[in-house]
Amino acid sequence: MSIIVDIYDKLLICCEQFSNNFTTADVIEVFRQRHPKDWDLLQQMYGKGGKGNGNNYSPYVYIGQMLGRMSRRKIIVFRSWAKAPEGWGNGVIMEFSPH
């Protein structure tokens, strides 16, 4: 069971906003705008995340893992690793494309 109800449906709608390749960061930005209450819940559970936060698990990791699962289920396509935006706790993030 996922922490967020209908997380895969919500993320798929976010992914469908992009006609070309998109990153985890792109999806998170759309998710935060479309589902602020869900994002707030993730932050309450895992903290704000980001470089220097002190948490190994964050809302960003949660969304990244859900996108990874969607890729393994062939809902979206993993393309490559991309340079992470400034301030992220990891140097790379996943890049995807729609089918």
Image (tube, grey):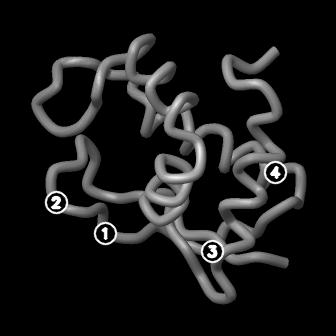
Question: Label 2 vs label 4: CA separation?
Answer: 27 Å
Quadrant of the image containing the C terminus: bottom right
Question: Label 1 vs label 3: CA separation?
Answer: 13 Å
Query: Neighbour class for label 3 at 10 Å: few (<14), some, many (≥20)?
Result: some
Q: Earlier in the sequence, mark 4 or mark 1?
A: 4
Which residue lies under the disc numbered 1?
83
Question: Label 2 vs label 3: CA separation?
Answer: 21 Å
Q: Is residue 57 left or right of residue 3?
A: left
Residue 45: name its quadrant. top left
Q: Nearer the viewer, residue 42 or 50?
A: 42
Q: Position of residue 76 (x, y in %)?
A: 78, 65
Q: Nearer the viewer, mark 2 or mark 1?
A: 2
Question: Label 2 vs label 1: CA separation?
Answer: 9 Å
The residue under the point 79% across, 43% down is 8
Which residue lies under the disc numbered 3?
79
Q: Position of residue 7 (x, y in %)?
A: 74, 36
Query: Neighbour class for label 2 at 10 Å: few (<14), some, many (≥20)?
Result: few
Q: Nearer the viewer, mark 2 or mark 4?
A: 2
Quadrant of the image containing the N terminus: top right
Q: Nearer the viewer, mark 2 or mark 3?
A: 2
Q: Are marks 4 and 3 in contact (CB under 8 Å)?
A: no
Q: Which mark is residue 86?
A: 2
Query: Neighbour class for label 4 at 10 Å: few (<14), some, many (≥20)?
Result: few
